[in-house]
Image (tube, rainbow, N blue to C red):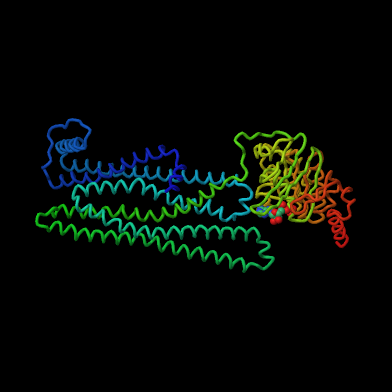
Amino acid sequence: MKIYFRLLQYAKPIQKYIVPYVLFSILGVIFGLLNFTLLIPVFDILFNNEAVQIVVKPVFSFSVQYFKDQFYYSLQEIIAQHGKVGALYFVCIILVSTVMLSNLFKYLSQRIMENWRIHIVMELRSAIFDKIMHLHLGYFSDQRKGDLIARVTSDVSTIQGSITNSLVVFFKEPLTLIGYFAVLFSMSTQLTLFTILIIPVSGIIISRLVKKLKRYANNAQVYFGNMISLLDESLGGIRVVKAFNAIEYVKDRLKHQNYEYSKNQRRIVARQQLASPISEFLGITTIAVILIYGGALVMEQQSALSASTFIAYIILFSQVLGPAKSLTNSLGDIQHGIVSGTRVFELLDVPLGVKDKPDAIVIKEFTNELKFQNVHFSYGDKQVLKGVDLTLTKGKTIALVGPSGGGKTTISDLIPRFYDPEEGVITIDGLDIRECTQESVRALMGVVNQEAILFNDTIANNIAFGMPNATPADIEQAARVANAHQFICESENGYDTIIGDRGNKLSGGQKQRLSIARAVLRNPPILLLDEATSALDTESERLVQDALTNLMKNRTTLVIAHRLSTIQHADEILVVQKGKIIERGSHTDLLGNPDGLYHRLLRMQELQHKTE
Ligand code: ADP
Ligand code: MG
């Protein structure tokens, strides 16, 4: 239930929808009732019934009686003027108009309901999108992408389906049922009390059914998420899948998930479809029991119930079955909605790992130095940084080197506040970066990673990414600095060439030069380069390295390098191993220690180079 009230938060502004909805529904019902009541004068005319005759013009009052009398009065006048056929025409025209109006109002109320539902779902979806974009990076390594996609798509559309049902359950059917029961009570209190006693029995049976459904529904979403994840991974890695002849393997895995999902669906459908026959069966059984009990009441000596009332009672009671049945059917859907709602709110409730303080400062410039003081950091239980100290002075270059898994990337991820340190502080010009807004900190830096992250868009838009005001001249300038201008001009549509999904129409070196151009265009005071060239072949590495050297000119840079020859000119080289900085100094300083790790790594790479 809590889930539903939370969902209703997205239903705002409620009055904008509920007021016209109720209004149109009531009008629809009134005109609907008029249709049936209008049949009575038609019969009266046809069968010459003179029973109802109003000769005096009725006095206005706001009552059903007045309108009825007024109608009959007008009808008589028409009969007097145009004869009975004329009156028949008159009644039929009104009949048609009321049918039209009642359906018009029904349509309008239905449309408002649908618009409301779409509005709720849209709000919910945009809340999810906002949330996902603000989630901390760690969330994405723990959670599979398919699961996220399933929550945004399939869960949200399940909610969409069940919202209407819930609105029906909450607003419409209870009112109808209360109305019916009020009349039933007025007909026979004893019998109705008896009826109400046996209703809980059906209630228990149905709630059993619904409970099982909830579990299946939850599994269904999980299977769906797995399927999407697998599909996403397989498509992303299609090249590897084919190269390793793993098509059959991947197909089997997809088939397996598909099968599990379908099996689960079958169970859900089996349960869901049971709801209708069971509620019908229970309804008729209830009627049978009432027949026995009520029949006994009628046949008693001083009968508490007249036979005609009893018949009317049974007819009316059978009318209750309709709304009762749609109530139970909706309950199943609502369970689905609740399961999905829970999953969506789980996502919306994930705490933001990195938060801006309410009075966070907007840091505008970098004038002096970036400093790590005794920084510790863990991914979950795994401690990765164990007391890192470093100082990056404006205009200088610091290089991080060392064996893979030592924590270099983690160090550079802490600077743009992708994560916050557990212990110790990182300061920019003496200001703790946790006191600053994430956006302002990130605006000070440009990042180039090992893997160029590009989007299926034009080259120009990929370079101008996140900078809508960049002019074509700026973009071209950036591309020149990044050694990319030439290959861009040679490609099909120049700067307007679409580069394919994740840029897969480009070579590795071209992709990397585009991401360098992107960093150049932002012109940030601090640069973070994480193994920007290590995924490249020697030829494109040289081109990219030239681009990087251009980029690093007059900037403050933290560079993580795999190939030690590229960072020999750095102002300071830090050797990172197992989360600690074990050696530091300039290239010549470090060479002076032949037992040091730097020396060893360098010798190893030289050997490698010779054998190449
Ligand atoms: P480097 O860049 O020096 O190769 P990283 O900083 O990438 O090292 O990783 C340091 C350690 O942290 C590694 O042992 C790695 O397994 C672990 N690690 C990196 N990223 C994550 C993550 N998102 N979740 C859990 N562990 C991680
Ligand atoms: Mg790394």
Say whether residue 480 is visible: no
Quarter of the image containing the C terminus?
bottom right
Residue 555, located in which quarter of the rendered image?
top right
Residue with the most extreme left position: 301
The x, y position of residue 485, in whole percent, is 77, 45
Relative to residue 229, is residue 29 drawn left or right?
Answer: left
The x, y position of residue 549, in whole percent, is 82, 45
The x, y position of residue 218, in whole percent, is 48, 57
The residue shown at (74%, 35%) is 429
Q: Looking at the picture, does residue 262 appear above or below residue 539?
A: below
Relative to residue 70, is residue 459 drawn left or right?
Answer: right
Relative to residue 111, is residue 528 drawn left or right?
Answer: right
Work out whether residue 447 or residue 594 is closer to the camera in this orientation and state it: 594
Q: How many marks?
A: 0
Residue 38, located in which quarter of the rendered image?
top left
The residue shown at (11%, 57%) is 300
Work out whether residue 6 or residue 10 is closer to the camera in this orientation and state it: 6
Q: Looking at the picture, does residue 490 appear above or below residue 94?
A: below
The x, y position of residue 131, in whole percent, is 56, 45
Report ligand 1 position as a quadrant.
Answer: bottom right
Say whether residue 380 is visible: yes
